[in-house]
Every structure is written in structure tokens, then in C-alpha cells.
Image (cartoon, coloured by chain):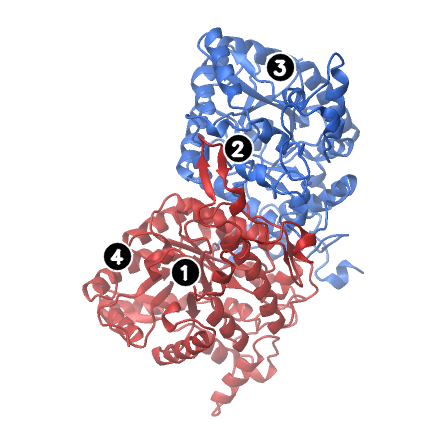
Chain colours: A red, B blue
């Protein structure tokens, strides 16, 4: 049980696209999301979030389209279903210079960038932002994404986590081990910019990567960025337990969250970490009204814009032509690559009539918290009491964040559920009290690891 | 001969590091370059450059350290010789939001990023900047750089250009071919974000890359960024003639520039382009004084800070321990991997005594234009009359740009050698009058190329 006075952490979780997880909402008259290519929207949003002392802005990302790859992508294109989308890392570099406190988090998967280049880009973001860079480690899960990078198909699930282990190992070596503490001198009088005894090549050689080093940037405030992860499979949870400082959840209920949290924390302890080394963030959507009636009316308005075709395309529930099934299609006639289990579950729940695609869509549609700011505060109190550390606020339309900031945050602050001012220092310091990863994290093993290391590949592989 | 009233174009060419091409200058009391990790320096610089109507800010870049790889990098580290350095693409994303007109150019080599990810990041920069992204295409030439990306050594020179041909082909297909003109609808009423008939997979299959597509970003204002290139070998010039819109030169003299320009333009015409499709930018350094005497004093001051050790380390003229040779070492005892030809030339020029390392250093040291703003204007007039289109201004220290802007630009404007206001539109429109590449460029071949293209790999490879 957390202390009753401990505020929740808040991330905004938009995506650098027009239609992220709430299909069809971009069509609303009040949706500015279709203008996502315009950076001014994002600067305004980031400033608004800082006024409301949001801890982070987190951009999920993809490296390809959803769904099966050998069917047309017509529905995906028409729905703007995370397509088009832009690179969030560059957006965060821009936002770093218009904000001072908010954490800058993004997803990058292990297929899309070589770890040497990726580690340099992240260090650059950490320098540009004064220590606010944060990475959501993703193994990649789209077949199209894999086929954009030369693979015939996605590697088998567990082998992706082995790949991810090597990927983060290379990055940790560069971030934590290549430059010793104090290596950067900037000593004009003695003509020593850095100390050669303290800058090291890493000579990494593994199944997938061979990287010489040294890391090109000097150490940034955090070195390793704040690490998020969202895996829910057994391999994914083991990976999170070992590496993550923040874990994204999509639980059904506070009790469901509590169960996932206690399981992952137990795994973390087995891996030599402490329960409090990990913070947990369920993703929630909100529909806010000044009165309960207004909130319900707004929920009706929001739901009237849900695109079932978009939802089903996202879940890869499409026919052989890539088209969504008509809503009255019997579920017995639905075949899908990824979600067949969910289809079967929906079928088994309805026994008094023939279940149809509309039943599946209702099952898959997200379940927002609807109510007045006070009612939402009540609900969030339950989530906090279940042991979650923070909330990923997921918008229907970008304007939702300003509404949450203006209407909900003040009530949460009154109740001690949201803080009123930022703490000092880096993103990690604000969340965990220190700028650098603690010694229990596997990355810490690479600190000083190369101080008396090899100077050539010959020595390294001797 | 250019028209006498045609102003020159001006790029600033700093690097996201403390010591770029003028070794040792970071030690000067007035050098802020050691603070390069602080983004505020760069925002101030970019704004200053816009006041002076500089056309572009161009960041060269590397993916590793200079010099041979199996010797210690002590001198490189001590000199801060392009190490540490950060990723310029992220810096440009930030600068895009603090400027309105200046072109945002950077180097990226074909080893450091997969073309699918790279093309997306560039499109993102073009969106963030309203059409000001520009790429200097580099094949990579550092052995350490190659060994950071899994290679045992750098591929043979000409094969790097074959690789580069495929790399740009993938990028062109994504930028020019994947989204037809008008594909983005944002049509709320008809629930069509984009037109499925106009968004295409590219199904690229070549010796090095297999990329499915579609391109994730929607078309940005320029689509393909403004393309720079700097190759001076036969393969490099052929590549520039085929692909470049701007060419960087390092000529000895206006006459030397004129010769390179006419040769490359002739190659461009052979490749189906027009002479005026390419603009040429020699890199020049400047030392400015209010009087000639002041300029000469300043030149002495600047040269007193030249680090010969840094210069020689940059040129890979180092002994087996990675150390620079003492200045009085006879050149007959100098062995170097990359620059042996230059060593031999220096030896052959001095016949009345034994040539030493100091002679080589003087030969390699850059040759700035030194004088009053009027004298510099005279010299630039000669360069313009030789047919160069613009100048890459290379700083000794970052403050040089403000000095050039405040002292030299006003004189150049009076003489019609520098413009007084920006033109309208994208970077390409400002330079060439149109936002998109013209039809003579090889990238144009991919426009509409996928409109009736394959929908699956099976069809694509049938």
C-alpha cells in the first residue's frame, strides 16, 4: 500500500500521427490531430503539460503498418491508422528546447536502428534536454516492420528478446562504460580536451553486433536514458524485470494491475533488483464533464465517432482483401492471424444468440473513465491504492490533454493525487532521486569495465 | 561568368563537436566551442545566421574517430578531435523550431543508418522545418566508423559508391514514389485520411537492402531533401554529377574551383542534367580585422593556437603508438596509412635541406582569407567571378560566424555579393526556384512508379 500523501506520476501518451489507439476520433470537428505534421501543435501541448506538471510525454511508435502483410492496406490508409507517422525522436529533440522539466520518452525498436547510432542519438537527446531522455525498449512486433528492414518475417518471439538483450548490452557499454566519470576535462591551459586514460573502446562482439567504439558523445546527465518497457508475455515480463525502470500496463482493473505489479516486482527481486526500482503506469483514457450528465453526453459523442473498421484493422481482424468484416458477420466466419484467441473468447461469452463482429468490437473497444473531475479523482485514488505509481493518459483527441490539465489536475492536486511543482534535476532524479542508474541495474556492470581493457581487437579476442 | 549582380550563397559549416577542422582553436580564451553540448549556443548561432540571411547551416559529421584503428587514440582524445561529438540531425530538429528560413543541412553516411529509418527521419525534419532539410550524402571513409557497424574494415572505395547508389535508390523510392501527389486527404466528412489508391509499397530488392514500404511519413514540402555531396575522386565526382544539387569543394584557388566545377558540370550533362542543376560551394576560412594590421595580428594569434599534433592526428600522420611525430622528425622517417602521398609531395618540394614534419604541417594547414571586410569582399568577388555559387564559411571558433555576420556581410551586401532578404519557400525553392527536384534528377524516375505496381512480394518478384 502506498502512502496516502504520495502523488501519482502522470505521462501524456500521444503518438506522432493522426490516429493512435482511438480509431476514428480524428474525424471529430474538434480534432486537430490531422495536423500532426505541424510542430506548433506539439510545442503548445508540451508547454501545457509542463504547466500541469506532467512528469513525461511519451510517444509510442511503429516501424511499419499493422496487420497481415499480404493483404491490401486500404483500410489502414483510409483510417490513417498510425499511417502516416513521423519519427518521435526528432520531435522530442525540438520539444527539449521549449520545455525545462518534462521527461521526453519515445519508443524505438531493435530492428529500426543500429545500436551504435541509436545510442548516440539518445545521448544527444539527453544533452539537448539536460537529462530528460527516456527510451521505451521494444522488440518490434509488426511483420511489415520486419520486412522494411530486410527480414522475410518477424523473428520468433523469444529470440527477439535474446536479440534485445544484446542490443541493450551494446548500448549500456557505450553509455556507461566507454567514458569514465571525469574523462571530459575541457582543459584549455593544459591542452587536454579529454583524458585518454579514461575514454575506451568497447570491442563488443556478439551474435548480431560487432562494435568497436568509443561512444562518440561524452556522458550526458543520465548516461543511460530512463528505461521503459511494456512486454506482457513471460519473456517480456522477465525482460522488464531485468531492465525497466518504468513499466507500461494495460490492465482491466486496479486489481489486475496489482497482480501484474506484484508478479513483475517478484521477478525483479529474483534478478537482484528491489521492488521500488520499478514504477508501474497503466494506460487510461478519460472522458470528463463538469457534471455527470455532461460526461455521459460526451461519452456518447466520443463513441459515435469510434471507427469499428479502424479498430478491427488495428487488431488485424480483416478479410483476405484487407477489409474489415461487416458488423453483422457471424464470428464463426471470422479468421484472423493475430487475434483468433480473442475472437474465440468473444464467441464463448455469448451463448444465447449467434455472436457477430459487433460483439467483438465492443469487447475490444477501450473502456474510459467517464465522469466529473471529482469522480475521476475517486477512481484514480483506487488505482493508486492498488499500488500503481503513475498513469499514462491516453487521449482520444489531442485537446483532451489540455482538458485533463485544466479540469482534472486541480482536483487531483487538492487531494494530494498530483504534485504541484516539479522536483529538481534529470528525469530519473525526479522519479528515483538520482541522475544515474543504481548499482543493481545490469547496465551498472559496465561502469569502469573497460578501464584496463583491450586496446585492439586482437587483444579483445585473444 | 555569373551576372555581376548575382549574390553568393552562404553556408555556415560548424560541427556538433568542439574541434572540427581547425585543430587546437578550442583552447583560445574566446572559444565557446568546448560548451558544444549546450543547445543554447546553437540556438543563438542559428538566429544570428538568420539575421545575416545565411542560406544554410551545414553540419559535417563522422561515425567514428579518425586515423588508423590499431593504434591508441590518445592524441585524438586529448585534442578533442571531433570526439566527443553528437548527432547533428537531432540538433537540426531543435533548430528548425527556432528559425524560419535557414536551410538545415547535415552529413549522414550510408553505414550509420538503415535507409528506411533514415528516410523517415529526414522526412520528419522536412516536416518540422517547413521544407528546409538537406542531406550531404557520404559513403563513409573511416575504418573505425566501419568497425562500429560490424564491418571488419571499410569496403573498397568504388564499391562504396555502388552501395551508395542503392542507398539513395531506396530513399528516393520512399520519398518520391511511395505517396502520390494528393494522397493525403484528411477528409473528415468522408472518413478518408489518405487515398489507398495513392499510397504504395515499394518492394525494393537489391544487393544490400530489401524494403517493403510504404514510407511512413506523408510527403513533406521538398520530399527529397536538398542533396549535397563532396566526393572528389573520380567515382565521387560521377556520383555528385548524378545526384548532387550542391557540391562542396576544397580548392586551392578560384581557378582550381573553376576547373572542378566545369569538370563536374560536364559529367552532369552527360548524366542528362543541366549545368545549372548543380551549385558549387568552396569551403573557406576567414580572419577579419577592422584594419589590415589588426587582421594580421589576429592571424598571428589564431596561428599561435594551431595544434600541429591535432592536425597530424586528423591526417593519420601518427607513429605506431598513435602519437604525433615531433616537429623536427625527418619526413623520411614518417610512415602513415592514408597520407603517404602527401608526405612524399612535401618531401619532393624541399630539396635544399632535409624536410621535417613541421614542413608537412605548414603544407596541410588551411589557408584563410585574412584582411579587412573590404579586402575579403574583393577576394570573394574573385571567387564569384570564377563561377562558384556560394561559400561554406568554416569557423576557427564559433564566434567567427557572428563576426562574419556583423562585419563582412554588410560590406558584401553593399556590393551585391550577399543578398539582403530571404526568398520565399523551401530551401530548394530559395536556391533553385522549386520545392521539388526537377525532372532531370534520377529521383524523379520514381514519381508515380508504383501507381500500378505490385501489391505483394510474390507479384513484385514474379
Label 3 sits on residue: B383
Disc 4 to disc 2, how far (Cα)?
Answer: 47 Å
Above or below — where is A355 with respect to B46? below
Same chain for labels 3 and 1? Say yes or no: no
The quadrant holding residue A147 is bottom right
Label 2 sits on residue: B19
- Please tell me which residue is depicted at 49% across the width and 65% down the height of the picture: A442
Disc 4 to disc 1, how far (Cα)?
Answer: 17 Å
Decide: few, some or many residues near mark 1? Use Cα within 10 Å; few <14, some 14-19, many ≥20.
many
Eye-nearest disc, 2 or 3: 2
Tag 4, which chain? A
Eye-nearest disc, 3 or 1: 3
Same chain for labels 2 and 3? Say yes or no: yes
Label 1 sits on residue: A13
Disc 3 to disc 1, how far (Cα)?
Answer: 53 Å
Task: Give whichever of discs 2 and 3 has the lower sequence position.
Answer: 2
Looking at this view, is B324 or A217 the one in front?
Answer: B324
Same chain for labels 3 and 4? Say yes or no: no
Label 4 sits on residue: A406
Decide: few, some or many residues near mark 3? Use Cα within 10 Å; few <14, some 14-19, many ≥20.
many
Q: Seen from this angle, which residue lies furthest left?
A: A414
In the rendered structure, are the residues bearing label 4 and label 1 in contact, judged by CB atoms less than 8 Å apart? no
Disc 2 to disc 3, how far (Cα)?
Answer: 27 Å
Secondary structure of the residue carrying numbered label 1: loop
Task: Give whichever of discs 4 and 1 has the lower sequence position.
Answer: 1
Please provide percent x and percent y for residue B401.
47, 24
Decide: few, some or many residues near mark 4? Use Cα within 10 Å; few <14, some 14-19, many ≥20.
some
Looking at this view, is A212 or A431 the one in front?
Answer: A212
Amino acid at each position: 500500500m502506498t502512502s496516502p500523501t504520495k502523488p501519482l506520476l502522470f505521462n501524456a501518451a500521444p503518438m506522432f500521427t493522426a490516429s493512435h489507439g482511438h480509431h476514428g476520433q480524428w474525424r471529430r470537428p474538434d480534432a486537430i490531430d490531422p495536423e500532426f505534421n505541424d510542430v506548433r501543435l506539439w510545442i503548445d501541448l508540451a508547454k501545457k503539460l509542463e504547466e500541469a506538471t506532467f512528469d513525461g510525454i511519451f510517444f509510442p511508435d511503429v516501424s511499419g503498418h499493422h496487420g497481415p502483410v499480404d493483404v491490401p492496406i486500404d483500410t489502414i490508409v483510409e483510417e490513417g491508422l498510425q499511417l502516416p507517422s513521423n519519427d518521435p525522436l526528432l520531435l522530442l529533440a525540438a520539444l527539449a528546447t521549449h520545455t525545462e522539466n518534462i521527461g521526453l520518452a519515445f519508443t524505438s525498436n531493435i530492428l529500426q536502428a543500429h545500436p551504435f547510432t541509436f545510442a548516440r542519438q539518445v545521448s544527444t537527446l539527453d544533452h539537448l534536454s539536460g537529462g530528460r531522455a527516456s527510451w521505451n525498449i521494444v522488440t518490434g512486433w509488426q511483420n511489415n516492420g520486419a520486412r522494411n528492414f530486410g527480414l522475410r518475417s518477424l523473428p520468433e518471439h523469444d529470440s527477439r528478446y535474446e536479440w534485445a538483450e544484446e542490443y541493450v548490452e551494446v548500448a549500456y557499454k557505450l553509455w556507461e562504460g566507454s567514458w569514465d566519470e571525469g574523462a571530459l576535462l575541457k582543459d584549455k591551459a593544459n591542452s587536454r580536451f579529454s583524458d585518454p586514460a579514461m575514454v575506451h573502446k568497447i570491442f563488443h562482439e556478439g551474435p548480431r553486433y560487432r562494435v568497436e567504439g568509443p561512444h562518440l558523445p561524452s556522458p550526458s546527465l543520465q548516461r543511460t536514458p530512463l528505461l521503459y518497457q511494456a512486454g506482457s508475455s513471460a519473456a517480456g515480463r522477465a525482460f522488464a524485470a531485468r531492465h525497466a525502470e518504468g513499466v507500461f500496463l494495460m490492465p482491466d482493473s486496479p486489481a489486475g494491475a496489482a497482480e501484474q505489479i506484484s508478479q513483475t516486482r517478484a521477478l525483479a527481486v529474483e534478478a537482484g533488483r528491489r521492488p521500488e526500482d520499478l514504477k508501474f503506469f497503466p494506460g487510461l483514457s478519460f472522458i470528463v464533464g463538469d457534471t455527470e450528465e455532461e460526461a455521459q453526453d460526451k461519452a456518447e459523442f466520443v463513441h459515435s465517432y469510434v471507427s469499428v473498421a479502424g479498430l478491427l484493422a488495428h487488431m488485424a481482424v480483416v478479410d483476405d482483401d484487407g477489409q474489415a468484416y461487416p458488423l453483422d458477420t457471424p464470428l464463426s466466419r471470422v479468421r484472423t492471424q493475430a487475434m483468433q484467441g480473442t475472437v474465440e473468447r468473444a464467441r464463448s461469452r455469448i451463448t444465447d444468440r449467434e455472436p457477430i463482429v459487433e460483439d467483438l468490437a465492443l469487447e475490444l473497444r477501450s473502456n474510459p473513465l467517464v465522469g466529473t473531475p471529482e469522480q475521476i479523482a475517486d477512481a484514480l485514488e483506487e488505482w493508486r491504492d492498488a499500488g500503481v505509481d503513475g498513469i499514462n493518459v491516453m487521449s482520444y483527441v489531442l485537446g483532451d490533454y489540455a482538458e485533463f490539465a485544466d479540469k482534472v489536475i486541480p482536483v487531483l492536486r487538492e487531494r494530494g493525487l498530483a504534485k504541484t511543482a516539479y522536483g529538481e534535476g534529470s528525469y530519473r532524479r525526479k522519479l528515483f532521486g538520482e541522475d544515474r542508474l543504481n548499482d543493481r541495474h545490469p547496465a551498472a556492470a559496465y561502469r569502469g569495465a573497460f578501464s584496463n581493457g583491450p586496446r585492439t581487437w586482437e587483444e579483445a579476442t585473444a
